[in-house]
Image (cartoon, grey):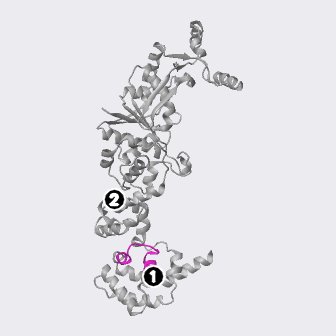
Amino acid sequence: MVRVRFAPSPTGHLHIGAARTALFNWLYAQNHKGRFILRIEDTDFARSSEKMSKGIIEGLEWLGLTWDEGPVFQSRRIALYQKKAEELIKKRKAYYCYCLPEEIQERKESVQKRGKYWKYDRRCLHLSEETKAQFEKKGKAKAVRFLVPEKEIQYIDLVHGQISINTTHIEDFVLLRGDGMPTYHLSVVVDDLDLGITHVIRGDDHISNTPKQILLYEAFESKLPSFAHLPLILGPDKKKLSKRHGVTSVLQFKDDGYLPLAIVNFLAQMSWSPGKEERIYSMEEMVQKFSLENVSKGSPVFNLSKLDWLNGQLISQMPASDLFPLVQEELERENLWCKDFSGKNKEWLMKLIDLLKERCRTLKDFSVSARPFLSDDFPVDSAGVEKYLKDERLPALLSILREDFAGIDDFRAENIERVLRATAEKEDVKAALLIHALRMLTLGMRVSPGIFDVIELLGKEKTIQRMSRLEQIKDFNKSSREKL
């Protein structure tokens, strides 16, 4: 059975690159009817935090990447790592190192000054038993180093193909530090063996770690897992994606109004394509189509405009009933929610959601677009005022149109349009003059959904009231420009 793991370190947030790694592991497990295991690598006590662990878990849950086993916390398995290190010492595949860090640094600098390559000089490998006994008697701190054999390491990477590395330049690396804490290489291999991991799917920044870990698998006389290293995600400047690009956490996207399925599609389609057609794929479709063989070797570039497009597509396709609770959360954050929206006015709000969703790229757009429908306190586009409310005929035309609107018994879009066009024809003006003016007066925007649908939802009373604000808005706009 396929067994994969996602093993984040809780020293930071669940960022985009890590989330994609989690997604590919999850998709691979689901595709092969295997197991997806969550492991928290929290042995860096100085930098790890419970808050970050909870944030990682919350981010995975939001994305829908549920795990079958775990979370397994490395901090609770220290004794196991120490036991495994001792096993290697007994097999003479590792040895104690009593060198202090400052002693090693001094020797390293001395070698480098002579223009030579440095790797640990194995001084402690050749210590006499008498010297070791003296160190032990003094209680000198000791690390455990792996004895690296000279050999050629070859393995097939499921993304990059065959990789070969000679161990000549790999020094005897530390397994346990002087304080008894494991290093990454020991803990990751011990855990992967203990958890029965069959496929290690991770970022290709780990390619350099793989030879050391292969040596450990061989030292433990265990079968190697399959390795697949995913290309790193780059920022728009073609450098590794980081905080400087403004992307700090997957949950940041949640707060910014993105939907989890849009994020999942965005992550998947940066390095792997479910098909030739650019669209939103369901989780089931991605599981069915997923294959590591189709993962690109090239590093994808983070493209926020594509995410916006995907998110907008998903929002426009969703029924209002599914969007309703999400829009409610957004309106509550902006103090635009009314309890009647869950009761007598729910049907009206559902119509409003359907009207606005085609133009919303994120959930936050709903609070911006819906504000004029829910409050009389909304911004007015000054450029729109200047362009569409300057015609000197408008005061008289709007006065006539208000009276004509007041006479509509069935205030529906088709009747509103019929009356407006009839008024425009009667007064010998283009209907567009009245339409643009109405949009500015009722919504404060130059662009909106169909104005007649807008006015129907806004209602007769509020529409007529706002049509009376022409001079007020023009005066405010003039005052604002004079201040500038």
Task: Give the number of the disc on residue 315.
Answer: none
Rendered location of residue 386, percent (x, y): 54, 80
Residue with the mark numbered 2: 325
Q: Amino acid at mark 2?
A: Pro
Rendered location of residue 401, percent (x, y): 39, 88
Residue with the mark numbered 1: 437
Provide the residue span drawn in magenta: 437-455
Disc 2 versus disc 1: nearer the observer = 1
Left or right relative to 203: residue 62: left
Left or right relative to 51: residue 64: left
Separation (CA) of disc 2 from disc 1: 33 Å
How many numbered marks are there? 2
* Closer to us: 307 or 443: 307
Query: Residue 6's image quarter?
Result: top left
Q: Is residue 279 magenta?
A: no
Badge 2 density bin: few <14, some 14–19, many ≥20, Cα 10 Å? few
